[in-house]
Amino acid sequence: MDEEQLRKMLSALRTEHRDLDVAIAALSEAAQDQGGGDQLQIARLKKRKLALRDRIAVIEDQLLPDIIA
């Protein structure tokens, strides 16, 4: 992939990561209101969010390689 494609993918992944943040917060709030809620769904979303964070880190490393001085 070229740099432009990587930047587009990075932007899409960051957007999805933020969307998951909102979804997790909403489900957590609903779970508190209902006295339990869907903890399995919340756990799955958190796992997906962590996977996205890892992919974001890999792409950022590709775009901004470490420079040893």
Image (cartoon, rainbow, N blue to C red):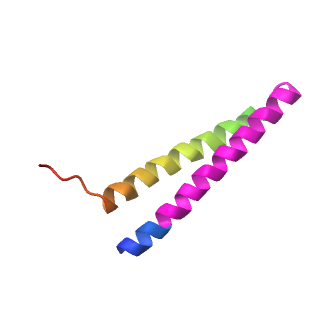
Q: Is residue 25 left or right of residue 55?
A: right
Q: Main secondary structure of the magenta part?
A: helix
Q: Is residue 37 visible?
A: no
Q: Is residue 34 visible?
A: yes
Q: Is residue 12 left or right of residue 64?
A: right
Identify the residue at image location x=45%, y=54%: 56
Give residue 15's position: percent from left, percent from top.
59, 58
Q: Looking at the picture, tell me which residue is in the foreground, 13 or 36.
A: 13
Q: Looking at the picture, tell me which residue is in the foreground, 40 or 61.
A: 61
Q: Which residues are magenta?
A: 9-36
On screen, residue 43 above or below 9: above
Q: Looking at the picture, tell me which residue is in the foreground, 39 or 22.
A: 22
On screen, residue 16 above or below 2: above
Give residue 27's position: percent from left, percent from top.
77, 39
List the single residue furthest toward the front: 69
List the single residue furthest toward the left: 69
On screen, residue 30 above or below 17: above
List the single residue furthest toward the top: 35
On screen, residue 1 above or below 39: below
Give residue 50's position: percent from left, percent from top.
52, 43
- Does the magenta-highlighted stretch encompass residue 21? yes
Identify the residue at image location x=53%, y=58%: 13
Identify the residue at image location x=41%, y=74%: 4
